[in-house]
């Protein structure tokens, strides 16, 4: 009701609550994009097994590096590329456009690379406990859905501290990459 040009609190409170909810939900993807956009790198020593060598002599060390790149694309999508290194030279490599869904960005494989025994590849990118988190499992004990993108020892269940995030200084080169162009094409085809 309007009384002398003002709304009564009974009408004003629900109206403001609805307005705030709409604004918050519209800002949520943008805020999360801003929070996670960048490149995350982690260098570490790994090793490969040399067949025929004695235990302890069998491992040949090398410098490995995990790299995750996240680039805002539009109001609801980010480009995600992950290269993760694992023991004995195994890797996970995946890239695509992830759409905002329920407080996270989710990449769904549009090319159906899934093996018959596994569900279609679905990769969730979120922030949990001050860590950027990737997972391709619907629940913690579920089967990994993106096995086709990883070597035998690899896994897309991964987290890295948010303080490892850096700005991407090579954005033009990244956007000219085959992976980025393919992700854009796949998104346009899916629309």
Image (spheres, rainbow, N blue to C red):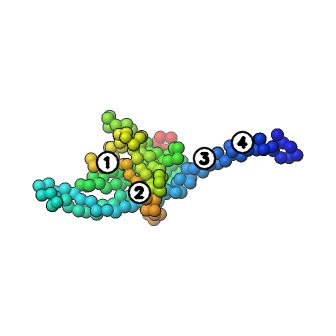
The first of marks 4 and 2 along the sequence is 4
Q: Position of residue 44 (x, y in %)?
A: 31, 62
Q: Residue at x 32, y 37 (%)?
A: 115
* Category of crowding for the residue at label 2, using alpha-carbon neighbours closer than 10 angstroms: few (below 14), some (14–19), many (at least 20): some
Q: Are marks 3 and 4 in contact (CB under 8 Å)?
A: no
Label 1 to label 4: alpha-carbon separation: 49 Å
Is residue 115 shown above or below 156? above
Query: In the displayed structure, does residue 127 sit left or right of residue 140?
Result: right
From the viewer's side, name the closer residue of 1 and 48: 1
- Circle 3/circle 1 CB separation < 8 Å: no
Question: Which residue is disc 3 drawn over?
Answer: 25
- Which residue is painted at 42% across and 45% down in the image? 123
Nearer-N-terminus badge (3/1): 3
Residue 160 got which mark? 2
- Residue at which label 1 appears: 150
Between label 3 and label 4, give the one nearer the viewer. 4
In whole angstroms, how far apart are the C-alphas of marks 2 and 3? 26 Å
């Amino acid at each position: 009701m309007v009384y002398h040009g003002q709304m009564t609190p009974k009408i004003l409170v629900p109206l403001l609550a609805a307005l705030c909810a709409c604004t918050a939900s519209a800002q949520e993807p943008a805020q999360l994009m801003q929070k996670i956009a960048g490149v995350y790198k982690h260098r570490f020593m790994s090793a490969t097994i040399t067949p025929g060598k004695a235990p302890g002599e069998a491992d040949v060390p090398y410098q490995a590096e995990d790299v995750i790149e996240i680039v805002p694309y539009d109001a609801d999508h980010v480009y995600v590329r992950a290269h993760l290194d694992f023991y004995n030279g195994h890797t996970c490599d995946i890239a695509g456009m992830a759409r905002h869904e329920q407080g996270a960005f989710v990449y769904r494989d549009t090319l159906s690379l899934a093996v018959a025994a596994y569900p279609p590849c679905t990769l969730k990118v979120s922030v949990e406990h001050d860590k950027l988190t990737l997972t391709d499992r619907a629940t913690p004990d579920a089967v990994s859905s993106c096995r086709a993108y990883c070597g035998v020892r690899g896994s897309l269940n991964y987290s890295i501290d948010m303080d490892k995030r850096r700005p991407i200084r090579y954005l033009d080169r990244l956007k000219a990459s085959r992976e980025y162009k393919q992700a854009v094409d796949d998104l346009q085809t899916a629309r």
